[in-house]
Image (cartoon, rainbow, N blue to C red):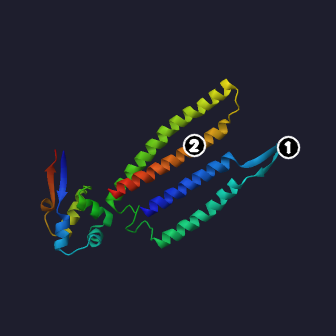
Amino acid sequence: MKKTIIQCSGNVLLFTLMGLAFMFPFSEITQMEMGFQGSVTIFPFLLIAYLIVYPIVHYILAKKYHWGKSADSELAYSDEREKIIVSESTKIAYKVLIGGLIITIAAIGGVKFFSLSTGMDISTYLSSIALSTALLDIATISYCAKWCWEYKK
Amino acid sequence: METLTNIVKELRTQKDMSQGKLAKLVGVTRQTIISLEKGSYVPSLLLAMRISEVLETPIEIIFIKESVE
């Protein structure tokens, strides 16, 4: 269970950092004749740092807790009950992802329509990234919660 | 509704075997044996046969089908 929680937490953090890095890459942008000039925010650097640190941390934890495909541990696929747990959790995550995707597409359309009809400047790009990030986070959390629930049965 | 009860715990204790050891012998995790003994997990036929071999008891004695209302 520890492995699943750690991996899911790692993924949630990764998706959140990716979302922030894509939503706010620059603090100020100045349009120039050729291209643009801007100050980079901290989020892209945090994402790069995370992408370097996470595999190292994962490797250390894998060594510490003896995670491996052949080991009799979580997600080893050697245990028939774990296969059922993984399948149930994947089913839930898939449902959340597909259901959420339909809602997300509708919401993006709604944002565009609202923006056009009210004259308010709402960025479709920002709302799309925010909704996609939230969706990925929710799907990952659903997978983790279902996994733990089934495992504890 | 039908359910499957078992006497794995009783047989395992009789043989002075730990849950971990039984799990290793039948090729599953200890958590699966815990779940199986509690009755919350119904094993596959293959696992049931492995348990039957390790506990040296016929499968129909270990696993009993019951009707629950």
* Residue name at image x 15 percent, y 70 percent: B56
Q: Indicate the quadrant containing the C terminus of chain B: top left, top right, bottom left or bottom right.
A: top left
Alpha-carbon neighbours of circle 2 within 10 Å: few (<14), some, or many (≥20)?
many
Q: Amino acid at mark 1?
A: Met
Alpha-carbon neighbours of circle 1 within 10 Å: few (<14), some, or many (≥20)?
few
* Residue name at image x 20 percent, y 75 percent: B16
Query: Relative to A138, is B33 above or below?
Result: below
Residue A8 spot, x, y in % from top left: 49, 56
Give left or right: position of A129 versus A59.
right
Give left or right: position of A84 versus A43.
left
Residue B59 spot, x, y in % from top left: 15, 61
Give left or right: position of A109 versus A71.
right
Nearer the camera: disc 1 or disc 2: 2
Q: Disc 2 on helix, strand or loop?
A: helix
Q: Residue most toward the bottom?
A: B16
Query: Relative to B62, is A106 above or below?
Result: above
Q: Amino acid at mark 2?
A: Ser
Q: B25 or A64, which is in the foreground? A: A64
Labels 1 and 2 within one chain: yes
If you read the primary sequence from the N terminus, does the residue marked by circle 1 or circle 2 appear first?
A: 1
Residue A39 spot, x, y in % from top left: 78, 51
Residue A129 spot, x, y in % from top left: 62, 43
Q: Which residue is mark 1?
A: A34
**Would you say residue B28 is visible in this rendering?**
no
Q: CA distance from mark 1 to mark 2?
A: 32 Å
Chain to which the residue tagged by mark 2 belongs: A
The dot on residue A132 is 2
Corner quadrant of residue A116: top right
Chain to which the residue tagged by mark 1 belongs: A
